[in-house]
Image (tube, rainbow, N blue to C red):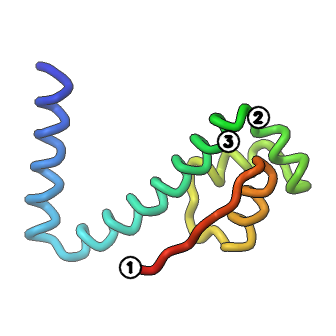
Amino acid sequence: MSKEIEIDDVSRYIAERKARDVEFAQDFDEGYEQFKIGVMLRQARESAGITQERVATELQTTKSAISRLENHAEDVRLSTLRKYAQAIGKSINVQLR
């Protein structure tokens, strides 16, 4: 079975489950948004060629705290995002849609 088919199957399952289960839909969407934030942070850091250790030093925290932020960006404060961005030489842009 190809990965494309597997992804289509997962996407179809998620869409069907969201259509019949409002709580699942809400929880899934919220969790996915948090996941995307963490992925964006990690990708930005890696593209800047900066290690988690260096970010941790800049933010006066631990590497494990940076790892948690990148992997579980749950309830992250805007001030933390701004400091993280500065530590990797970037800035953040917040948009409301």
The answer to whether mark 3 and mark 1 are in CB contact below 8 A is: no
Q: Residue 47's quadrant in the figure?
A: top right
Q: Residue at x 19, y 76 (%)?
A: 22
Q: Which residue is mark 2?
A: 51
In the rendered view, does 24 fall on the left or right side of 49? left
In the rendered view, does 3 fall on the left or right side of 61? left
Q: CA distance from mark 3 to mark 1?
A: 26 Å
In the rendered view, does 68 fall on the left or right side of 74? right
Within 10 Å of disc 3 (Cα), the crowding (few <14, some 14-19, many 20+) is many
In the rendered view, does 85 fall on the left or right side of 7? right
Q: Secondary structure at mark 1?
A: loop
- Closer to the chain start, of discs 3 and 1, is 3
Within 10 Å of disc 1 (Cα), the crowding (few <14, some 14-19, many 20+) is few
In front of the other: 88 or 52:
88
Q: Amino acid at mark 3?
A: Arg
Q: Which residue is mark 3?
A: 45
Q: Which residue is mark 1?
A: 97
Q: Residue at x 16, y 47 (%)?
A: 11
For residue 29, above or below residue 95: above
Q: Secondary structure at mark 3?
A: helix
The answer to whether mark 3 and mark 2 are in CB contact below 8 A is: yes
Q: Amino acid at mark 1?
A: Arg
Q: CA distance from mark 1 to mark 2?
A: 32 Å
Q: Residue 48's quadrant in the figure?
A: top right
Within 10 Å of disc 2 (Cα), the crowding (few <14, some 14-19, many 20+) is some
Front disc: 1 or 2: 1
Q: Amino acid at mark 2?
A: Thr
- Closer to the chain start, of discs 3 and 2, is 3
Q: Residue at x 10, y 49 (%)?
A: 12
Residue 71: give x, y in percent of width and height. Answer: 57, 48
Residue 37: give x, y in percent of width and height. Answer: 52, 57
* Quadrant showing the C terminus: bottom left
